[in-house]
Amino acid sequence: MKHYVRTVLTAASAFALVAVAAPAVAAAPAPAPTATVVTPGKPTPVRPGADLSTLVAADDADGYLYAFDLPDFQGAWCRWNSNDSWWGDDCGNFNDRATSVWNNGFPGYYSEVSLNRDVNLSTNLARLCIEAGDYYADLSLGYEKFLDGPSADNAISSHHWFTDDADYYGDPHYAC
């Protein structure tokens, strides 16, 4: 009998709480929807697990790799749509100047970019890779590092487009 009374009292308490709280919840203003504001010239943030093939297409991929000399895609910039073995002869010498990078390449073959610390493509561990539609907004934070450990901030000298596919494991430029 005690168990039955305790159950009835517990249920009654729960109903009373709902009856008191429901009007207050209903009267509370709904939070305003938050919209992601995308500044022109900046990439749209990529959520983990996103299908990059549809995301890049929705963001009007233009087939270029972009590099900026300041964080958050500010300052002087340069762009490439093919391999470049030395950034020193581009955009007023962009060698070792990149602090933010964005791969706005098309999805599919040759959609990923290997960012290289050295001008010599045979140095496989001096690389940091970036997939189509992805970006690094602030390399100066030190999170993005070359495969051999050093920070990529102001240290990129060249890049190479490649395809991340099992058929390309024999590619001498494949490193990521």
Image (cartoon, rainbow, N blue to C red):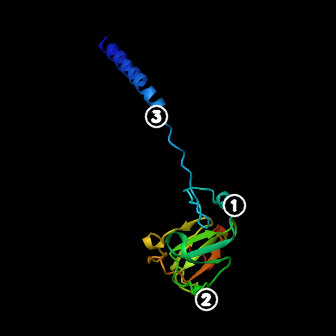
The quarter of the rendered structure image containing the C terminus is bottom right
Q: Residue at x 62, y 73 (%)?
A: 65
Q: Residues within 10 Å of mark 1 (few under 14, many from 20)?
A: some
Q: Position of residue 110 (x, y in %)?
A: 68, 72
Question: Mark 2 touching mark 1, by CB under 8 A?
Answer: no
Mark 2 is on which residue type? Answer: Asp
- For label 2, the SS is helix
* Left or right: 84, with 14 as reference point: right
Mark 1 is on which residue type? Answer: Ala
The residue labelled by disc 3 is: 28
N-terminal of the two: label 3 or label 2?
3
The Cα–Cα distance between marks 3 and 2, rounded to whole angstroms, is 60 Å
Residue 4 seen in the figure = yes
Residue found farthest to the top: 1
Q: Residue at x 42, y 24 (%)?
A: 18
- For label 3, the SS is loop
Viewer-nearest residue: 171 or 76: 76
Q: Nearer the viewer, mark 3 or mark 2?
A: 3
N-terminal of the two: label 1 or label 3?
3
Q: Residues within 10 Å of mark 3 (few under 14, many from 20)?
A: few
* Left or right: 97, with 56 as reference point: left
Mark 3 is on which residue type? Answer: Ala
The residue labelled by disc 2 is: 89
The Cα–Cα distance between marks 2 and 1, rounded to whole angstroms, is 31 Å
Viewer-nearest residue: 173 or 22: 22
Task: Please say if 16 is above or below 64.
Answer: above
Q: Residue at x 55, y 56 (%)?
A: 47
Q: Position of residue 6 (x, y in %)?
A: 32, 17
- Determine which of the numbered discs, if any, sits on residue 57 in the image: 1
